[in-house]
Amino acid sequence: MSSVPVLLFASYADAFGGRTIDVPIRPPCTVSELVDAMRAMAGGDRLPAQPLVAVNHAYAAPDLLIRDGDEVALIPPVAGG
């Protein structure tokens, strides 16, 4: 099976143990399918119900199709004040 590399930041990098992970899912797949596959991985239980995902530097809807070669990043919650 191929995989989709995902960039991780802050608390997500801590949860998954690195700044980049390879998610075992074959593209093309939807953002929602990718998130489901990430939930099955060690650390995936720390993901919120609907994490923010960016594909090719733009926020992505759950039904967006991820293709081979797309840049995918999981955007952690940001607190400010």
Image: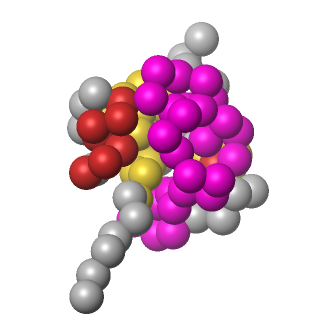
Left/right placement of residue 73 relative to residue 47 reads left
At horizontal 25% and vertical 88% (from top left) the residue drawn is: 81
Q: In the displayed orientation, state which residue is furthest to the right.
A: 63
Q: How far across and how far down the image is residue 45, in percent?
A: 54, 34
Task: Evaluate whether residue 28 shows in this view.
Answer: no
Coloration mode: secondary structure
At horizontal 27% and vertical 37% (from top left) the residue drawn is: 14
**Total marks placed:** 0
Q: In the displayed orientation, state which residue is furthest to the front.
A: 81
**Camera-side residue of 36 and 60:** 36
Q: In the displayed orientation, state which residue is furthest to the bottom.
A: 81
**Camera-side residue of 36 and 70:** 36
Left/right placement of residue 68 relative to residue 28 reads left
Task: Evaluate whether residue 47 shows in this view.
Answer: yes
Q: Which residues are magenta?
A: 32-59
**Camera-side residue of 75 and 5:** 75
At horizontal 61% and vertical 24% (from top left) the residue drawn is: 40
Residue 38 position (above or below residue 81): above
Q: How far across and how far down the image is residue 22, in percent?
A: 42, 25
Q: How far across and how far down the image is residue 1, in percent?
A: 59, 11
Residue 52 position (above or below residue 24): below
Rendered image quadrant of residue 64: bottom right
Residue 48 forms part of the magenta stretch: yes
Q: How far across and how far down the image is residue 18, in percent?
A: 25, 31
At horizontal 34% and vertical 70% (from top left) the residue drawn is: 78
Left/right placement of residue 52 relative to residue 74 reads right
